[in-house]
Amino acid sequence: MNTAKKLMAHYETMLKSFSHQHWWPGDTPLEIMIGAVLTQNTNWKNVELAINNLKRENLLDIEKLVKIPPTDLAQLIKPAGYFTVKTKRLQNLIRFVWQNYKGDLGRFFDQSIGSLREELLSVSGVGPETADDIILYAAQKPTFVVDAYTYRIALRHHFIAQEDDYQTIKDFFESNLPADVHLYNEYHALLVAAGKNFCKRKIPLCDQCPLNIYDHNPNLPEEF
């Protein structure tokens, strides 16, 4: 079985076990974009609390987010943690869209994946994972998102090497999978489900994991 078929076999196994994950929660592209920033280093329940605060104050609007004082925004997104840092990151991103696209997310997203990703990465506080989250889930363009779960599962199943960086892992998946928004969306979500439930960092539950039918090595260096 070649690599592409192996990746799809893993996908089908996870889909059968976990079903569709219905990612990314959010009513609008702006809400999804905000969530992508706020979810850094926290769990989604905390992000939902922060977004609900913004909704309650009718602040899911780019112009309002540009104008709100940072101290006020920080209090509203406090449940998401690291609220001082995240306030700066969120306003950096919102200001970029406001200043360069007059707040028009449609125009912002209506460019090539490469150009959009380059612009997102130019914003202070937006790293590769956040940029790809925004491109995939908010802009609905096919770019593969890599996170700690992706790394851990791909490493344990011998798809990547320990020293591979974000871009190398991203390129690996994209070169072996069709460039399809739905597939990339679901694949990333399923890897998170597998990682949270079974492929744990210190004590993986390999015997219970649906992916245990494939060749894998549960042992990783301690820091992973």
Image (spheres, rainbow, N blue to C red):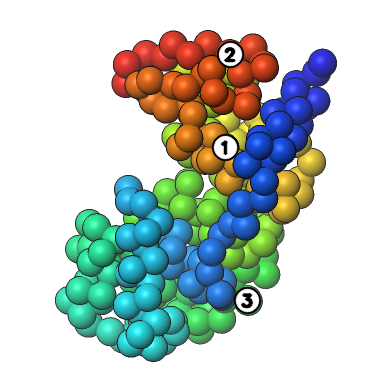
Which numbered marker is on residue 191? 1
Q: Residue 192: horizontal and vertical position, in percent?
A: 52, 40
Q: Residue at x 80, y 25 (%)?
A: 5
The residue singled out by tag 2 in the image is: 216
Callout 1: 10 Å neighbours few (<14), some, many (20+)?
A: many
Could you say whether the residue bearing mark 1 is in a helix, strand or loop? Answer: helix
Label 3 CA crowd tier, 10 Å (few <14, some 14–19, many 20+): few
Q: Where is residue 104 drawn, in percent x and y?
A: 56, 81
Secondary structure beneath label 3: helix
**Outermost front residue:** 208
Measured from the top left, where is residue 177 in percent x and y? Answer: 75, 36
Mark 2: give few (<14), some (14-19) or many (20+) Cα within 10 Å: some
Look at the image and tell me whether residue 12 can be seen.
Answer: yes
Q: Which of marks 2 and 3 is nearer the N terminus?
A: 3
The CA distance from mark 2 to mark 3 is 44 Å
Check disc 3 and give the amino acid type.
Answer: Arg
Is label 2 in contact with label 3 (beta carbons under 8 Å)?
no
Disc marking residue 107: 3
Q: Is 142 located above or below residue 165 in the figure?
A: below
Q: In this image, 179 relative to 104: left or right?
A: right
Q: Cα distance, mark 3 to mark 1? A: 31 Å
